[in-house]
Image (cartoon, grey):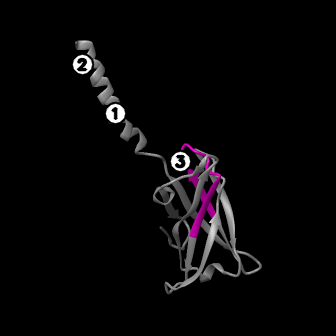
């Protein structure tokens, strides 16, 4: 009888622990490290991605919106940052053609367009994406 009670307690403890273990699927940190003017008038963004999830993201595509200094939308673009290896930090560079860095007042991550592993789409990537900036331009989500 005692053995059956202890077994039942173990099963209950395991069931209550499952949501705790699944509660933190990890984050995808995106840092706007710096913006740099190119000789051709384009602006180059240096971005640091840290995939703190347990999965390699084959595709990680952000929907970015650029605003000028007055808060007016100047441009919208899709930025493909994948692949991002699990537990890895990587720097990626992106050129924003026909846009000078001085024209950018802020950058908004409007959402995650696509987030996929080799097994298929991953849900909740927008929620798990955290943004920071070291540049003089606000980087928001």
At 50% from the left and 87% from the top, the residue drawn is 70
> Circle 2 sits in a helix, a strand or a loop, which is it?
helix
User: Is the residue marked by circle 3 packed among few (<14), some (14-19), or many (20+) residues within 10 Å?
Assistant: some
At 41% from the left and 38% from the top, the residue drawn is 21
Q: Which residue is mark 2?
A: 5
> Circle 1 sits in a helix, a strand or a loop, which is it?
helix
Q: Nearer the viewer, residue 45 or 72?
A: 72
Q: Can you tell which quarter of the image residue 60 is in?
A: bottom right
Which dot marks residue 52?
3
Q: Closer to the observer: label 1 or label 3?
A: 1
Magenta-colored stretch includes residue 49: yes
Q: Can you tell which quarter of the image residue 104 is in?
A: bottom right
Q: Identify the magenta region.
A: 46-63
The vertical placement of 86 against 5, above or below, is below
Magenta-colored stretch includes residue 57: yes
Q: Which residue is mark 1?
A: 15
Q: CA distance from mark 3 to mark 2?
A: 39 Å
Of pointers 1 and 3, the one earlier in the residue sequence:
1
């Amino acid at each position: 009888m005692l053995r059956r009670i202890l077994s039942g307690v173990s099963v209950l403890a395991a069931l209550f622990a499952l949501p705790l273990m699944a509660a933190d699927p990890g984050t995808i940190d995106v840092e706007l490290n710096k913006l740099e003017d190119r000789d051709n008038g384009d602006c180059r963004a240096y971005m640091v991605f840290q995939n703190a999830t347990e999965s390699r993201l084959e595709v990680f595509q952000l929907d970015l919106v650029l605003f000028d200094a007055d808060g007016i939308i100047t441009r919208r673009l899709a930025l493909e940052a994948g692949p991002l290896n699990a537990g890895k930090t990587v720097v990626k560079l992106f050129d924003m053609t026909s846009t000078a860095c001085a024209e950018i007042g802020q950058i908004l991550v409007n959402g995650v367009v696509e987030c996929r592993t080799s097994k298929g789409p991953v849900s909740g990537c927008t929620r798990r994406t955290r943004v920071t900036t070291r540049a003089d331009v606000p980087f928001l989500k």
